Image (spheres, rainbow, N blue to C red):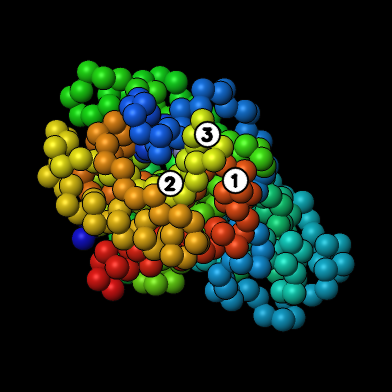
């Protein structure tokens, strides 16, 4: 199944290797004004706000799938006070050697902020006998030092650039959290050889009620989906695990193509001019798409399965599949792929819902259910 696994080194996600494609659905557009369901697809013209690496992109504690209990055993945990006092300041980059909990305090009893994946780059700012104080995506927390190394993980780069690879089973699924904090206004061809040019990527839409940025919600669900799929025996290649990246839609599609993935799922939230429009939407190409019409059947099956799974798990209204050839990320993608628009951030109720950890966990499980159906598992 996977030919070349593009492993990753998330730390260098930012690079855009020449030749890569770019791709996601992001922002594509909506130029078809005829279908209100889709207006959403991003293209919010706003300038991206500077990213503060700070906001946490991870899910709320409590809903995180149980992390492997890979932490040091009891005595290493020590009391918070004692451990805090024993911390020595350092400044270095380290990498996780396994999936491990990021905790609020240096104690096994402390709240789990999130589960860090393997090979994740972190800034280490302090060490004690058993714990390391680290910064990840702007969040400070503690990780068992036994699961950190200063050696860079194996990085395999190909023309598609880098993704973050997690070994879990024979089937490889690429998860692409739509958008990113920076907009990329430069353009790229809407399809291989196409003269129609579109912006490389937008920052997505924004919650009408919460003000939540779409790219953050997308990543939160993507990270939960990653863990859900790993627990179900899939391997996962993440296009991004932080918001501060530079990945165009073509590049994202190329990442899937070059990895030899079995499927790609692109996670998005929708938007409409009308605040009353609500529901989830699946998107794939038409049968006549000049670039990828040959995989239409697979893409439609995947789209229906993922959409149904999502709607059943979350209770969001199923508004069906929209077939369109306007999506750059779809046109460039050569493996079965789908866009799941989880709900409308322009609808106050769905906007509020999309931001909750309960909804996000349900969405991750529902999308995973859809993948199980598609792969006959
Ligand atoms: Zn989007």
Q: Position of residue 112 (x, y in %)?
A: 67, 66
Residue identifier under label 1: 351
Front residue of this view, candidates 179 and 307: 307
The residue labelled by disc 2 is 341
Towards the viewer: 103 or 365: 365
Left or right: 8, with 77 as reference point = left
Q: Secondary structure at mark 2?
A: strand
Q: Residue at horizontal 36%, vertical 71%?
A: 233
Query: How busy is the neighbourhood of tag 2: few (under 14 within 10 Å), some, or many (20 plus)?
Result: many
Above or below, 66 relative to 315: below
Q: Which of 225/146 is in front?
A: 225
- Residue located at (20% from left, 29% from top): 192
Q: Earlier in the sequence, mark 3 or mark 1?
A: 3
- Looking at the rendering, the quadrant in which ligand 1 lies is top left
Residue 307: which numbered mark, if any?
none
Q: Position of residue 169 (x, y in %)?
A: 32, 69
Query: Which of disc 1 and disc 2 is earlier in sequence?
Result: 2
Question: Residue reaching furthest front?
Answer: 276
Confirm or reject: label 2 Cβ below 8 Å from ligand 1. Answer: yes
Q: Nearer the viewer, mark 3 or mark 1?
A: 3
Q: Is residue 168 left or right of residue 56?
A: left
Q: Callout 1 environment at 10 Å: few (<14), some (14 to 19), or many (20+)?
A: many
Q: Which residue is mark 3?
A: 274
Mark before the other along the chain sequence, 3 or 2: 3
Mark 3 → mark 2, Cα distance in angstroms? 16 Å
Q: Which of these two is toward me, 316 or 241?
A: 316
SS at mark 3 in the image? loop
Q: Which quarter of the image is occupied by the N terminus? A: bottom left
Residue at left offset 62%, top offset 37%: 208
């Amino acid at each position: 199944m996977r030919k070349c696994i593009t492993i990753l080194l998330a730390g260098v996600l930012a690079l855009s290797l020449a030749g890569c494609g770019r791709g996601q659905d992001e922002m594509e557009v909506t130029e078809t004004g005829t279908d209100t369901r889709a207006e959403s697809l991003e293209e919010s013209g706003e300038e991206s706000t500077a990213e503060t690496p700070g906001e946490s992109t991870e899910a709320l504690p409590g809903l995180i799938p149980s992390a492997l209990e890979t932490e040091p055993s009891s005595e290493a945990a020590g009391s918070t006070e004692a451990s805090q006092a024993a911390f020595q300041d350092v400044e270095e980059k380290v990498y996780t050697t396994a999936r491990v909990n990021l905790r609020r305090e240096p104690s096994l009893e402390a709240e789990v902020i999130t589960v860090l994946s393997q090979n994740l780059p972190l800034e280490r700012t302090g060490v004690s006998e058993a714990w390391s104080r680290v910064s990840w995506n702007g969040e400070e927390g503690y990780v068992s030092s036994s699961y950190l190394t200063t050696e860079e993980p194996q990085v395999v780069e190909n023309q598609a650039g880098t993704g973050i690879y997690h070994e879990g089973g024979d089937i490889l699924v690429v998860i692409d959290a739509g958008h990113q904090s920076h907009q990329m206004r430069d353009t790229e061809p809407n399809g291989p050889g196409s003269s129609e040019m579109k912006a490389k990527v937008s920052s997505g839409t924004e919650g009408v009620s919460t003000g939540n940025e779409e790219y953050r919600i997308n990543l939160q669900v993507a990270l939960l989906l990653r863990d859900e799929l790993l627990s179900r025996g899939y391997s996962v290649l993440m296009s991004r695990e932080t918001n501060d990246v530079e990945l165009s839609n073509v590049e994202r599609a190329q990442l899937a193509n070059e990895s030899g993935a079995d499927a790609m799922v692109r996670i998005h939230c929708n938007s409409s001019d009308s605040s009353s429009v609500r529901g989830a939407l699946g998107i794939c190409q038409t049968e006549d798409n000049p670039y990828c019409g040959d995989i239409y059947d697979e893409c439609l099956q995947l789209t229906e399965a993922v959409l149904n799974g999502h709607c059943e798990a979350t209770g969001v209204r199923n508004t069906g599949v929209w077939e369109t050839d306007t999506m750059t990320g779809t046109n460039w993608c050569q493996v079965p792929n789908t866009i799941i628009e989880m709900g409308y951030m322009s609808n106050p109720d769905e906007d509020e819902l999309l931001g909750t950890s309960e909804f996000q966990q349900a969405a991750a499980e529902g999308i995973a259910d859809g993948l199980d159906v598609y792969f006959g598992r």
